[in-house]
Amino acid sequence: MTADFAPTPEAWARALRIEPQPIFSPMIGVLVEMLNYARLTTLTAVEGLSRSELDITYDDFPHSVAMLLGHLAATERAYQHLSFEGQDPFAGDVPDYDRYLGAMTFGEHGLVVRGHEPEALLSELAEVRAATLAELARRDDAWLSRRLTLPEMTDMNHHWIWFHVMEEELGHRRQIRLLREAMVRAQAGSS
């Protein structure tokens, strides 16, 4: 991973305070701070991994770090469609989401995420997040509380959607940490 994506001491100091930026409404601002913290911890978890290390899998856990990073981008992009655009990317009527299906389904319905440079995967995450933040800056707290209007999804509100994106990232970040620990154990065992 290049230094462009490595969290700085300043970023860490800022992440330890939930102080919404003025560009966001108060509740959205708090949510954004939490999304930013979760992302910072993910970046830290993958810091220093090589292309080959990103692709390592184990018999008891078939997903690589690369696949998990791809899945995070795919999840956030899916929720952008649901939340901002009122479209269901899984209904087949959002062609630009097709490229994410492999990552979203862990390779079941598309390509497995493999063979990418760390910078490419992290750039994709950054691009998807930038789009999320731009859209959230255009909305207010009343919107955050509104329920989705898509059929079969009316129980969810936008706040839950973006909480779930953060929850998803934290869960997969833990899996990334476990994979790193397994790599360290494997390297120690081969020494």
Image: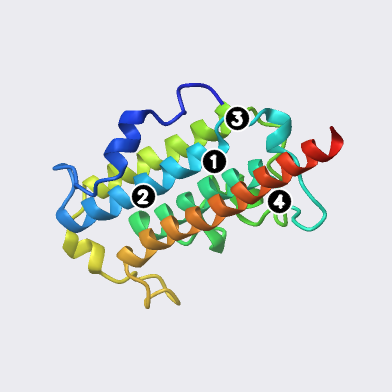
The mark that comes first in sequence, 2 or 3, is: 2
Residue at the spot 31% in from the left edge and 64% down from the top edge: 159
15 up-or-down from 150: above or below: above
* Residue corresponding to mark 4: 63
| Cβ–Cβ under 8 Å for marks 2 and 1 | no
Asked if residue 24 lies left or right of residue 2, the reply is left
Q: Nearer the viewer, mark 2 or mark 1?
A: 1
The mark that comes first in sequence, 3 or 1, is: 1
Q: Secondary structure at mark 2?
A: helix
Q: Position of residue 40 (x, y in %)?
A: 42, 40
Q: Secondary structure at mark 1?
A: helix
Residue at the spot 75% in from the left edge and 41% down from the top edge: 56
* Residue corresponding to mark 1: 45
* Residue corresponding to mark 2: 35
Residue at the spot 29% in from the left edge and 48% down from the top edge: 33
Q: Secondary structure at mark 3?
A: helix
The mark that comes first in sequence, 2 or 1, is: 2
